[in-house]
Image: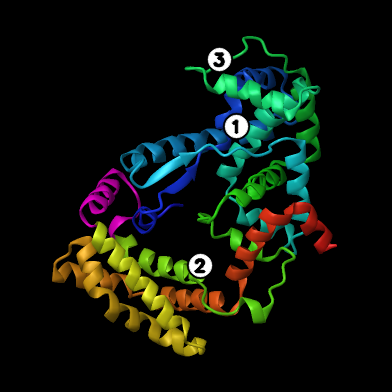
Amino acid sequence: MVSGAVFLYFHDETVGLTLHPSVSTFMAGTDPFQFFRLVEERQPSWAQQFFKLVSYWKTYRASLAQTMAILEPLRGAAFKTIWLAYNRDTYAFESATELLSSSSLAKHEIVASIDQFSASDELFAHIFFGKYLELVSPDKSNEDLFATGKALAQKSEEVFTANADWTALYQYCDQLFEVNNLENLLTTAYMFRMPALRRADAVLLSNPRLIPFLASLPIELQDDTNKGMGTDRLDAIAWEFFRQLVSPMIDPLNKTQVQKISELLKKRDKEIIRLKNRCFALAEELGDEADLELLQRNIRNHIRTSVEKEVQEVLDLDNQALNDLLDSVFADEKTWVGIAIFLYSLINGGDVLTAGSAIYALASIGSKAFKAARQ
């Protein structure tokens, strides 16, 4: 879900990768595996759905651990991790439900837009962190819960309650899984972090399937105020050019590719900046094209003839290797036709621009306002 090009293009800004939602679970002071055994013993009607969730969660956590181990050499130089705090309780569940109900997409289209494995960690955190704390500490304020969590987070190791009282949480799961199927629960949980976007100056959307969903939210663009090429839009286009040009040499990510990225960051800093600037200049040049058909026809050749020198310098390629790379990059006409449409939509409106506006509006006004707008 992450291209190695991210760590080159944004190296001077240091990308923030959010920690997994269930990282907070230990702060509740409980061991979820105790609950797993309880469900295994009692075998409620929802046990199969529950253990399917657990299976997704375990797969996600294993994949995450492997990914972070691969990326570790780039920590600090190219990325930092962020522990993102946001609601995962009843309020979060209600807000996510409101957000989903405000979309004009059919239910199955929204389900298809999420990543079930990432969503499983959100749902896991909802059950074993947000909802658990809500159930066992109904009289505590958010500030009290935060202070408790902070104290636990500062301990050198995880401390679990040996015999937690799971009664209330078991009853909650009894209701949760009886009323909802797992597919719906995952889709709802996937929306939990959307309001947290208000804290970000910019967002890298690692799941492009979300664009149709975001564009389906009740947001209207004013043509006279949204057309044109602002810096943010130029940067989005320049990034897309940059990614297409260098990705074949450094993706998919593995230990060897990460080592290559690390060396490029150390030895080719100035060359990376020059290629970024060239891609930005190309975005400006091509952004003036008002004829989509002409843009689709010319974009490949125009970019290829403009970036050869910069690509060769960044990736330290001989002439034959450079030609082989560029031949592969520009071989698929459909890819560049798609990029032309992406560029055109950023200039003139379209799903990508609407999705960006939806993210901004969601961060500003929240899901309740979306629901009201939909109604």
Identify which residue, 192 or 266, lies in the foreground.
266
Residue 234 higher or lower than 169, as above or below:
below
Contact check, label 1 and label 3, Cβ < 8 Å = no
Badge 1 or badge 2: first in the primary sequence:
1
Amino acid under label 3?
Answer: Val
Q: Quadrant of residue 224?
A: bottom right
Which color scheme does this rendered protein use?
rainbow
Q: Which mark is residue 232?
A: 2
Magenta span main SS? helix
- Check disc 1 and report its element: helix, strand or loop: helix
Q: Which mark is residue 159?
A: 3
- Check disc 3 and report its element: helix, strand or loop: loop
Residue 220 at what x, y percent from top left?
72, 71
Badge 1 or badge 3: first in the primary sequence:
1
- Report whether residue 337 is seen: yes
Residue 6 at what x, y percent from top left?
39, 55
Amino acid under label 2?
Answer: Asp
Residue drawn where x is 76% and y is 48% of the image: 97
Q: State yes or no: residue 134 in magenta.
A: no
- Give the CA distance from mark 1 to mark 3: 22 Å
Of badges 2 and 3, the one in the foreground is 2
Amino acid under label 1?
Answer: Val
- Give the CA distance from mark 1 to mark 2: 40 Å
Residue 85 higher or lower than 312, as above or below:
above
The range drawn in magenta is 249-268
Q: Is residue 247 left or right of residue 150?
A: left
